[in-house]
Image (spheres, rainbow, N blue to C red):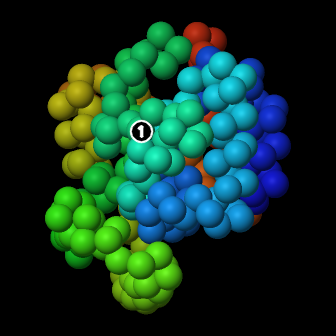
């Protein structure tokens, strides 16, 4: 799907006012020295081309690439986004986030997320040799897949209570997120307000993106 991403960066991305990536741009990221990897270099080069064309780029860290850092951002001409962003998207206040924090029914994952987001642990991990980091991350991913295979599907999706809480806390009527790999448009009611939640697709099979402007919002294939 790298070729599809490159085509996206050469086409639709350059027609946008800004392009924001909501996490998991990479399936794994063990530090910004991963830019030496051929696949990572291709993705970074594609994004850098978009930035060079004058398009604003924002990149949010996901659970798989939470170690994206300032060296990566400088290489692609992007701004690293915080975990939660409220922005005007096509005239509608919209909450953007990766989406894993909405999966509160999966307590094991949430505990793991807190562990991996500890700044001291991250610094110690990044101080290790590159190849050792790659090996450790591969072990963690295998363990994660094994644990996920034993969980009910529903527990790994977003919690309705967490979604409602996010709508209330941020005073928005639209949420856009990824993480769950369940692309969809959900219409809900929170506190008597009509709300909508858009879920981004992954890029394993076909890829896709949300196009948002004043005329509306649309999920498009690449």
Name the residue that disc number 1 marks. Answer: 80
- Name the residue: 64% across, 29% down: 51
Q: Residues within 10 Å of mark 1 (few under 14, many from 20)?
A: some
Could one spot residue 81 in this view of the protein?
yes
18, above or below 115, in the image: above
Q: Position of residue 147 (x, y in %)?
A: 37, 86
- Name the residue: 41% across, 44% down: 70
Instruction: Report helix, strand or loop for mark 1.
Output: strand
Q: Nearer the viewer, residue 47 or 150?
A: 47
125, above or below 73, in the image: below
Quadrant occupied by the N terminus:
bottom right
70, above or below 112, in the image: above
Could one spot residue 109 in this view of the protein?
no
Is 169 situated left or right of 129 in this image? left
Count every numbered label the image shows and give the total.
1
Q: Position of residue 137 (x, y in %)?
A: 43, 79
- Name the residue: 35% across, 77% down: 128
- Name the residue: 18% across, 31% down: 169
């Amino acid at each position: 799907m790298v070729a599809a991403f490159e085509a996206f960066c050469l086409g639709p991305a350059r027609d946008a006012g800004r392009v924001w990536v909501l996490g998991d741009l990479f399936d794994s990221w063990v530090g910004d020295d991963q830019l030496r990897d051929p696949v990572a270099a291709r993705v970074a080069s594609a994004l850098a081309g978009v930035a060079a064309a004058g398009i604003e780029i924002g990149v949010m860290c996901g659970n798989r690439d939470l170690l994206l850092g300032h060296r990566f951002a400088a290489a692609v001409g992007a701004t690293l986004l915080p975990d939660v962003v409220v922005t005007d998207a096509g005239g509608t206040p919209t909450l953007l986030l990766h989406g894993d924090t909405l999966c509160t029914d999966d307590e094991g994952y949430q505990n793991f997320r807190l562990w991996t987001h500890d700044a001291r642990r991250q610094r110690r991990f990044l101080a290790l040799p590159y190849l050792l980091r790659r090996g450790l991350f591969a072990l963690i991913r295998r363990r994660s897949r094994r644990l996920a295979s034993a969980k009910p599907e529903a527990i790994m999706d977003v919690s309705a209570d967490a979604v409602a809480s996010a709508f209330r806390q941020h005073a928005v009527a639209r949420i856009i997120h990824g993480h769950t790999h369940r692309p969809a448009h959900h219409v809900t009611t929170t506190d008597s307000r009509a709300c909508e939640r858009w879920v981004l697709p992954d890029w394993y099979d076909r890829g896709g993106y949300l196009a948002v402007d004043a005329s509306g919002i649309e999920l498009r294939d690449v």
